Image (cartoon, helix red, strand yellow):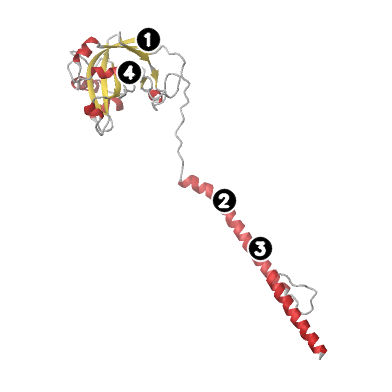
């Protein structure tokens, strides 16, 4: 009887060991009641090892492929950074004799660097008059840009006085440029306002086009003269080289509208 009870207890203990071994992943190999099937454990280890290897391989493939895919499908275009070291002092000037003079810079690359910077390259929101990067006073036309402001402190604010003001024009018909040791004198022949925010605007031809045949230039320059708000009495022809001063119009009839407008002052080289 006692022997049967002992056998039964051993069987129960063995079952308990198996349960604990199954729960914690461990079975005492010295137990003679349960012998662990080595083949099944090895199979599971091999299966897990195979799964881990597969995951590692997949991650490696993704890591290797991802930069190439990003590079090909989403290229990033970075605009060139213009590094300009402007002079502390410049002898280049633009003036309206007896009433106005300012420094004159050259736009280095078409990014309107001086629209909001002074001659030292320091941002100031006002800027300084600057020459179009395509121009150097040797071609048929040269464009100079600068701000006007509703606060009255723009470097080209004085040009607003030419708008619909014939008497101011008669008192101040000349513009003088000093550039790279040379002096150029121009006489104003046309003053008008051009729509600025539409590339289809006929008035923006003066900005978009630089090269002309003799015939096209003669027709163009006559059109500039005919656009004037008032007759300046100054004749122009195909042999003339011209200067164009461009700034924002501060006339409320234009400035407060949805589209932006430019005030354009055109002058021909006389000396």
Q: Are marks 4 and 1 in contact (CB under 8 Å)?
A: no
Where residue 198 sits in the image (x, y, percent)? 27, 33
Viewer-side label of 4, 1: 1
Q: Residues within 10 Å of mark 3 (few under 14, many from 20)?
A: few
Q: Nearer the viewer, residue 141 or 144?
A: 144
Q: Earlier in the sequence, mark 2 or mark 1?
A: 2
Q: Residue at x 40, y 9 (%)?
A: 181
Mark 4 or mark 3: whose residue is earlier in sequence: 3
Q: Residue at x 45, y 38 (%)?
A: 77
Residue at the disc numbered 3: 49
Residue lying at the far bottom of the rendered structure: 1
Image quarter hosting the C terminus: top left
Q: Mark 4 and mark 1: span between their CA atoms?
A: 15 Å
Q: CA distance from mark 2 to mark 1?
A: 62 Å
Task: Return the residue at label 2.
Answer: 63
Give the structural element (helix, strand or loop) at label 3: helix
Q: Earlier in the sequence, mark 4 or mark 2?
A: 2
- Residue 182, labelled with which disc? 1
Residue 107 horizontal/vertical position (percent): 39, 22
Name above or below for residue 91 compared with residue 52: above
Q: Distance of mark 1 from mark 3, alpha carbons?
A: 83 Å
Q: How far apart in space, not on screen, are marks 3 and 2 (Cα)?
A: 21 Å
Residue 114 visible in this rendered orientation of the protein: yes
Circle 4 SS class: loop
Residue at the disc numbered 4: 139
- Label 2: how many residues lie within 10 Å, few (<14), some (14-19) or many (20+)? few
Label located before the other in sequence (1 or 3): 3
Left or right relative to 216: residue 35: right
Mark 4 vs mark 3, foreground winner is 3
Q: Residue at x 20, y 17 (%)?
A: 165
């Amino acid at each position: 009887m006692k022997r049967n009870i002992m056998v039964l207890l051993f069987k129960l203990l063995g079952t308990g060991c198996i349960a604990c071994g199954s729960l914690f992943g461990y079975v005492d190999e010295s137990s003679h009641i349960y012998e662990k099937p080595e083949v099944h454990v090895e199979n599971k280890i091999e299966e897990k090892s195979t799964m881990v290897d597969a995951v590692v391989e997949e991650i490696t493939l993704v890591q290797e492929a991802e930069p190439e895919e990003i590079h090909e499908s989403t290229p990033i275009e970075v605009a060139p950074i213009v590094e300009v070291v402007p002079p502390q002092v410049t002898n280049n000037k633009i003036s309206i004799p007896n009433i106005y003079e300012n420094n004159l810079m050259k736009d280095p690359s078409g990014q309107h660097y001086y629209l909001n910077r002074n001659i030292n390259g320091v941002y100031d929101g006002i800027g300084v008059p600057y020459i179009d990067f395509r121009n150097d006073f040797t071609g048929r036309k040269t464009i100079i840009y600068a701000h006007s402001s509703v606060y009255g402190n723009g470097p080209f604010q004085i040009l607003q006085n030419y708008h619909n003001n014939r008497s101011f024009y008669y008192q101040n018909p000349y513009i003088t440029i000093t550039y790279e040791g040379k002096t150029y004198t121009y006489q104003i022949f046309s003053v008008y306002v051009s729509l600025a925010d539409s590339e289809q605007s006929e008035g923006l031809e003066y900005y978009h086009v630089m090269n002309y045949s003799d015939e096209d230039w003669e027709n163009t320059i006559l059109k500039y003269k005919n656009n004037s708000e008032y007759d300046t009495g100054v004749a122009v022809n195909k042999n003339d080289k011209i200067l164009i001063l461009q700034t924002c119009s501060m006339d409320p009839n234009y400035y407060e509208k949805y589209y932006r407008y430019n005030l354009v002052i055109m002058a021909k080289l006389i000396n």
